[in-house]
Image (cartoon, rainbow, N blue to C red):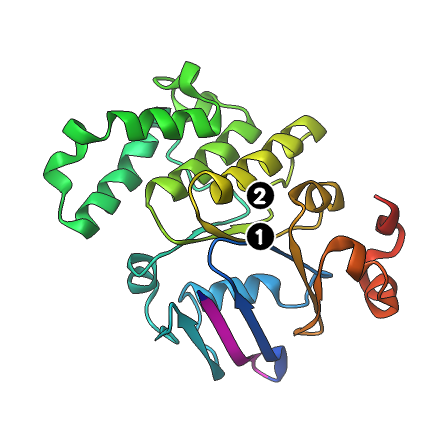
Amino acid sequence: MLEIKSIVKRFGGLTVLNDLSLSLERGSVNCIIGPNGCGKTTLFNLVTGRLRPDQGQILLNGRDVTGLPAWRIANLGISRKFQIPGVYPELSVVENLIVPLAASQRKSGLLGTLFSRNTDRLASLLDLCGLAHKATAKVETLAHGEKQWLEIAMLLAFDADLILLDEPTAGMSVPETQKTAELVKRLQTEFGKTVLVIEHDMSFVRALECRLVVMLRGKVVREGSLEEIQKDPEVVAAYLGGAVAC
């Protein structure tokens, strides 16, 4: 559903992405790993329209979305989570979910049916993020992990086909990290979403049990399972190191 063809992105004299190509199958979970500075977040910025590539092409479901503004790309079916939770702290949990639900209904021209037809939808989203018991609580009172889970549920509420998650386990405890992996897998198995994750925590990567994309020096250098990439000497030397045994 997503095809990235020979993308190049420069900042002044620095080439951050250098002839990078990548494709994602519909309904798959994929995880990008690589050292800091290899261009992972820049790639997300290009896919979501926050930046324009200097060269190359980005196709979503066969449609050229290269350089389109972020709001148009979002409406075409891509939603993104940043490293810092993008929630509304002064609103309740359920109100945070109603905001993207309303945006989704507006896209489809069904805004007037939001409250009459989405009770089950809200219940499903609250169950996904494990916050049904805190539905009326203000988000500012939630723990860090709970805010991260709520934001992922908000992305699902917007009903995008492709969900991008930038380091969703940053700052989490081990149990929170495990729960996040389970939540991400549910996006695929229960809701049929395509997911692309940037992550450094190898325990989380292992728990996802998904296809990995390894980036080095602005390029994709290896794709495959964790077991497969652990056998690549270049990847081990440049990135995995002691994490191979995680």
On the image, numbered disc 1 is attached to which residue?
197
Residue 47 percent across, percent down from the top left: 45, 66
Answer above or below: position of 14 versus 181: below
Taking the spot 52% from the left edge, 27% from the top edge, the residue there is: 146
Q: Is residue 100 a member of the stretch shown in magenta? A: no
Question: Residue 136 vs residue 141: left or right?
Answer: left
The main secondary structure of the magenta stretch is strand
Which residue is under mark 2?
Answer: 168
Q: In x, y percent, where is residue 173?
A: 69, 29
Q: Which residues are magenta?
A: 2-12
Q: Nearer the viewer, mark 1 or mark 2?
A: 1
Circle 1: element type? strand
Q: Quadrant of residue 42?
A: bottom right
162 lies left or right of 91: right
* Residue at left offset 25%, top offset 46%: 104
27 to 19, vertically: above or below: above
Looking at the picture, how far across and down is residue 100, in whole percent?
Answer: 30, 41
Question: Which residue is more in the foreground, 221 or 24?
Answer: 24
Say which element carries label 2.
Answer: loop
Q: Nearer the viewer, residue 191 or 216?
A: 191
Residue type pointed to by label 1: Val
Vertical comparison of 230 with 158: above or below: below
Give the residue type at disc 2.
Pro
